[in-house]
Amino acid sequence: VTLDTFYCNADGWLMLPYPLEYGAGYELIEVESPHGYFLDGKSVYFDVDGSEAIVTVVKKNTPQKGRIIVHKTGEVLSHIEQNGDVYQPVYTVQGLPGAVYDVIASKNIVTGDGTVRAQKGDVVDTITTSKTGTGSSDLLYLGQYEIVERIVPENMTLNPNPKKVVLSYAGQTIDVTEASTEVYNERQRVAVSLTKYMEQDEQFHIGMNEEILSVRFGLFAAEPIQAADGSFVPVDGLLEMVSLNKNGEALLTTDLPVGAH
């Protein structure tokens, strides 16, 4: 039988306005937890046996915690296509392993009892992404955080922009809440250009008749270039043929992965 329902004061204390009859088997049941705390549903049993004028019953609450999840993506050399004698690298956006992030408190992290759990600027955890590109933090107290990239996956450029993440209260029935953020990395790119110089002889009109427009260059792989699916460009595989302009210049357009070519 429910005898009554009461609310604790600001200090977390409650004195019943009337005495309880002597007896065993009283049960204190929390039906609403303080904001920011988890309602665990466990009862506290106590007896009133007359041995003391005031029976103190303690019910502890656990602050709700959260987990920050990072999804890391970027372009990966997924496969190699071949058109005749020419090999073409192809890229797709995939999850990236090996990225490392610091989780930093962007404000003081304070629980409902006034305890400061972390100071603004504290690094409270480190997240490393798995082979699927996903990484998660340990359990953290609710509050505002920043995710700062510290180590990037191979052949990627550092993303300098911190990600703001808020672990918010998800209600008293939720033990652990989650917040996620997406981080994209640009891969390092290769730009290859060349300039060809030809000797000119005015007397015999050599090199002065746009002969340079007939010159062509080939870009070949100096070492195997392997894609994620196992396909590859072999050594001396042709990647591109290019012609020169009137100034003897050319810019190769093939999107090359970092490496020797």
Image (spheres, grey):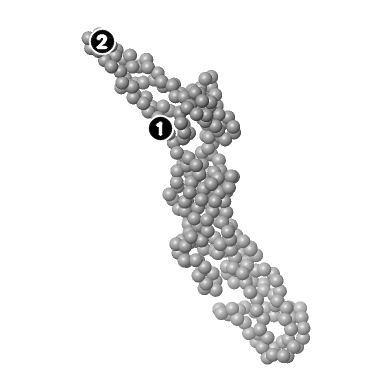
Local SS, label 1: loop
Q: Residue at x 47, y 62 (%)?
A: 122
In which quadrant will I find the N terminus?
A: bottom right
- Side of 133 relative to 199 (left or right): right
* Residue 179 visible within the image: no
Local SS, label 2: loop
Badge 1: how crowded within 10 Å, few (<14), some, or many (20+)? Answer: few
Q: Position of residue 51 (x, y in %)?
A: 72, 90
Q: Residue at x 67, y 78 (%)?
A: 5
Task: Mark 1 or mark 2: name the one nearer the start of the chain.
Answer: 1
Badge 2: how crowded within 10 Å, few (<14), some, or many (20+)? Answer: few
Quadrant of the rendered image containing residue 33? bottom right
In which quadrant will I find the C terminus?
A: top left
Question: Where is mark 2, residue-wise?
Answer: 205
* Residue 23 visible within the image: yes
Query: Relative to residue 256, is residue 242 depicted above or below?
Result: above
